[in-house]
Amino acid sequence: MKRVITYGTFDLIHYGHINLLRRAKALGDYLIVGLSTDEFNWNEKHKVSFFSYEQRKELLEAIRYVDLVIPEENWDQKSKDVKEYHIDTFVIGDDWKGKFDFLKEDCEVVYLPRTPEISTSQIKAELKGSDN
Ligand code: C2G
């Protein structure tokens, strides 16, 4: 069984996220998502998600491509996760291209093209604009 892992905040889940998760799952048989905790988002990514970790976890677990959701608590856990979960392939959007090449020692590293014209920040901005 080929095991794949990816990481992200996945807030206000949208078709860009789904496109990523669908292609990630197509690279193997079992997909793990390292979901950024609220603390990690705030302390390290300086972004506040609309939905809490538990809400974002519930949403991801309802997606057919996702087999397991684990917390992403820091930038440095990926190598440990790859070993602990016997990962064959790490995958993430190409906005991160090159950033995780160090994982090539332990698994295949794949950067997938992002879906254009959709982002959580864009959704938030448009919703904010429609309030006025
Ligand atoms: N994504 C995409 N197309 C979009 C938006 C997002 O392919 N239009 C992908 C991103 O490239 C990422 C995943 O969807 O692979 C999740 O996106 P975010 O929730 O924005 O995750 P990010 O903040 O990039 O966190 O340690 C890695 C980080 O946790 C990644």
Image (tube, grey):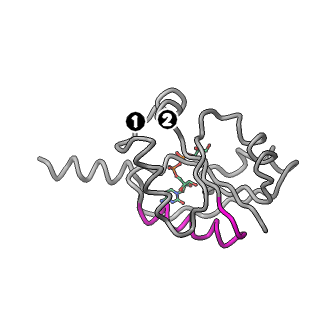
Q: How many numbered tags mark residues here?
A: 2
Residue at the image position 49 percent from the left and 30 percent from the top:
39
Residue at the location (79% across, 68% down)? Answer: 1
Residue 122, image x, y percentages: 35, 52
Image position of 79 (left or right of 48): right
Q: Nearer the viewer, residue 117 or 86?
A: 86
- In the rendered image, residue 51, in percent from the top left (x then y), is placed at 37, 44
User: Is the residue marked by circle 1 packed among few (<14), some (14-19), or many (20+) residues within 10 Å?
Assistant: some
Residue depicted at x 78% and y 55%: 87
> Mark 2 Cα within 10 Å, few/some/many (few <14, many 20+)?
many
Mark 1 in CB contact with mark 2 (< 8 angstroms) = yes
Query: What is the span of residues highlighted in magenta in the rendered image?
Result: 14-31
Residue 85, image x, y percentages:
76, 50
Residue closer to the observer: 86 or 17? 86
The verdict on residue 93 being magenta is no
Would you identify the image quadrant in which residue 14 lies? bottom left
Q: Quadrant of residue 74?
A: top right
Three-letter amino acid code at the position of disc 1: Val
Secondary-structure class at tag 1: loop
Label 1 within 8 A of ligand 1 by Cβ: no
Query: To which residue does mark 1 refer?
Result: 48
Q: Which residue is mark 2?
A: 41
Marks 1 and 2 sit apart, C-alpha to C-alpha, by 6 Å
Kind of residue at disc 2: Asn
Q: Residue 93: x percent and y percent?
A: 60, 57
